[in-house]
Amino acid sequence: GGGGLSGGVSRSRTISRATPALVAAAIIMHGGSRRRYGTYREEEGAACSMKDAGQVDLACFNTIAHDVDSQQQGTSQGVAPVAKPPNFDPHECRTNIHCCHWCLQCETEGCVSTYPRCDEFFASAFDKCTVDDGPNWVLIILIIVCVIIVVGVGIRLARYCYIRQHQRTSSLFIQRQIEREKLLGSKSFEVPSRLTFSGNCTEQGMETACSYDLNIFKNGTFTGTGQDCDGQSEVKGMMVQDGITTQHKIHWIETQYHLRSRVEMEVEGTMTMLPGSSGSDFQIQANYVTRNGSVSGNLKLHSRGTCQTSHVVGIAIGSSSHN
């Protein structure tokens, strides 16, 4: 039998070279036989395409009404509807053209078997039937599985690239992190429990304003916040008194959170009490590096001074260049 698969996610089969019984069954199933009595016109929108009316007329005489003289009868088309008589003998169909139309009116396979060679007439009268088997669920499921796999791989690849790009750690960052974590904090009595700094950070020769509020504990540890043009950052660090002087080594990690990223940098330097200030005036000079090592810079802060911004241009700590 003839057949094929088409239509993407919808399956259809074209029946054209199958057995007469299969062709007849397909035509009945898809309504191809339901037409006006006495005509051989193809019904609009039918799934089964009928041959030319002349060919169908000839098929009637060659199959069912094979003992009718077509030359004498002329045609089986255009005849008035005739009801099948009671106790009709199907074998009389060989001389009765109405059997061709009764055959075409069949809606069940049992009806087709009533008329001798009715199935052959169906097979000869129709060119082909396109049978829609509905959605191709195997193909649909396969497509869904493939989409899930592709999306999953894409997400994992994007995450991997993001981690590689944004969370790789430079050797200098690691070195400073280790140094900070090894420190044992201490501070001179002159250092108050709270200091507010303002000043400048410098990256690639460009300066911008920044400020810090630090809460300092007796053991030399401190926490606080930093502020620049990109927003606020968290500060956590350690200071260590240098001998008996009022100078301190100072280390901290600074973290700034953005919508989809986090910028971290390690800062190290010195904090010095300026002469004559009696604990009221301190200065910090430090440098920093971001986790991925792409940005580094310097800090110069004063606990009482303010940063002049009218002439400052550049990139602040935690700016988009750190990403």
Image (spheres, rainbow, N blue to C red):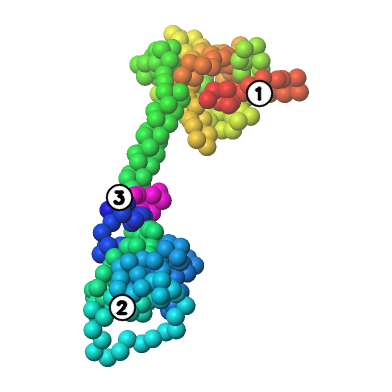
Residue at figure coordinates x 34%, y 62% from the top left: 124
Residue that protrudes farthest toward the right in the picture: 310
Main SS, magenta region, reads loop
Label 1 or label 2, whichever lies nearer to me, is 2
| Whether residue 53 is situated above or below residue 97 in the rendered picture | above
The residue singled out by tag 1 in the image is: 209
Q: Position of residue 249 (x, y in %)?
A: 47, 13
Gap in angstroms between the C-alphas marked 1 and 2: 109 Å
Q: Which residue is mark 2?
A: 95
Is 314 placed above or below 53 here? above
Judging depth in this view, the residue of 206 and 3 nearest the camera is 3
Q: Which residue in the structure is indicated by mark 3?
A: 138
Secondary structure state at the residue bearing disc 2: helix
User: Which kind of residue does numbered mark 2 sit on?
Assistant: Thr
Q: Please tell me whether mark 1 or mark 3 is closer to you in this view.
A: 3
Determine whether, in the image, residue 113 is placed left or right of residue 207: left
- Mark 2, other Cα within 10 Å: few <14 / some 14–19 / many ≥20: some
Range drawn in magenta: 4-11
Crowding near the residue tagged with mark 3, few <14, some 14–19, many ≥20 C-alpha atoms within 10 Å: few
Q: Amino acid at mark 1?
A: Ala
Mark 3 element type = helix
Pointers 1 and 3 in contact (C-beta within 8 Å): no
Q: Nearer the viewer, mark 2 or mark 3?
A: 2
Question: Is residue 80 found left or right of 314 in the rendered image?
Answer: left
